[in-house]
């Protein structure tokens, strides 16, 4: 392809948006979704086809946000879109650096979806209303309730549990995703094991 035959970056973006197919290959319970790796795998061949490069950059703000920028770069210019994810506040068994690294893929995913006009609304656990998830999965909090009851019986305070939930997720349990529910179950189970060990019953 000669320089004269190369499309402008805007033409390249229009073509990529038209040709891009990024199937939802990931599973979360009953829901299918795509992650940033799926999007990149689909975008890279098209970017190369239209002689462009896709570049990501992250900025972490003082109020706990990861702001990612996805940029399509061509010879005549560039076009960008941004995405935002919140960094979890010191989750269990995770450093600040790891929490920041976990937020980056989500922010980049939303930036890429904005730039390449990818619709994430259908059957995506990141976008799907949690109330609908709960309606389709009755009893999704039963194990958490059972673990909390056992914690209270062992003398673990409700305040301590709530403090961890607030610092880790920063939202009501009714809005938890399946992955967040599973993480909460693991945390409560570890509290029970640790408490029994301290009591000499482990």
Image (cartoon, rainbow, N blue to C red):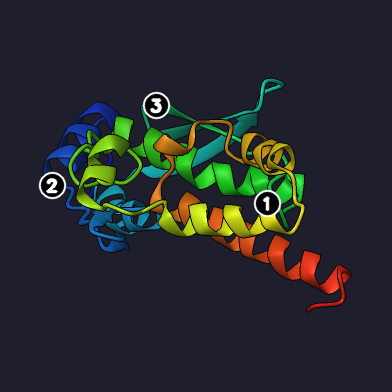
- Which quadrant holds residue 183? bottom right
108 vs 170, nearest the viewer: 170
Dot 2, crowdedness within 10 Å: few (<14), some or many (≥20)? Answer: few
Q: Mark 2 sits on what residue?
A: 19
Q: Nearer the viewer, mark 3 or mark 1?
A: 1
Q: Mark 1 sits on what residue?
A: 152
114 vs 51, nearest the viewer: 114
Q: Mark 3 sits on what residue?
A: 81
The picture places residue 37, in percent across and down from the top left corner, at: 40, 57
The picture places residue 186, in percent across and down from the top left corner, at: 59, 63
Q: Decide if residue 165 is on the left or right side of residue 138.
A: right
Work out whether mark 3 precedes mark 2 in sequence or the reverse, and give the earlier one.
2
Outermost residue, left direction? 18
Mark 3–mark 1 distance (CA, rounded to whole Å): 47 Å
- Which quadrant holds residue 86? top right
54 vs 41, nearest the viewer: 41
Mark 1–mark 2 distance (CA, rounded to whole Å): 55 Å
Vertical relation: 153 (above or below) 16? below
Dot 1, crowdedness within 10 Å: few (<14), some or many (≥20)? Answer: few
Q: Residue at x 40, y 46 (%)?
A: 177
Q: Quadrant of the C terminus?
A: bottom right
Vertical relation: 155 (above or below) 89? below
Q: Decide if residue 99 is on the left or right side of residue 132.
A: right
């Amino acid at each position: 392809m000669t320089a004269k035959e190369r499309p402008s970056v805007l033409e390249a973006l229009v073509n990529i948006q038209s040709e891009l197919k990024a199937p939802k290959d990931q599973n979360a319970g009953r829901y299918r979704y795509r992650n940033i790796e799926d999007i990149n795998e689909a975008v890279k061949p098209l970017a190369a086809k239209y002689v462009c490069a896709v570049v990501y950059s992250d900025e972490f703000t003082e109020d706990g946000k990861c702001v990612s920028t996805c940029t399509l770069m061509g010879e005549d210019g560039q076009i960008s879109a941004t995405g935002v994810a919140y960094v979890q506040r010191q989750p269990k068994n995770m450093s600040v650096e790891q929490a920041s690294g976990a937020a980056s893929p989500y922010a980049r995913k939303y930036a890429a979806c904005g730039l390449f006009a990818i619709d994430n609304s259908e059957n995506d656990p990141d976008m799907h209303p949690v109330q609908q998830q709960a309606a389709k999965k009755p009893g999704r909090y039963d194990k958490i309730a059972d673990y909390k009851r056992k914690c209270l019986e062992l003398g673990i305070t409700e305040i301590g549990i709530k403090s961890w939930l607030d610092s880790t997720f920063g939202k009501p349990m009714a809005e938890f995703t399946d992955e967040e529910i599973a993480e909460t179950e693991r945390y409560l189970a570890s509290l029970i094991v640790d408490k029994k060990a301290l009591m000499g019953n482990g």
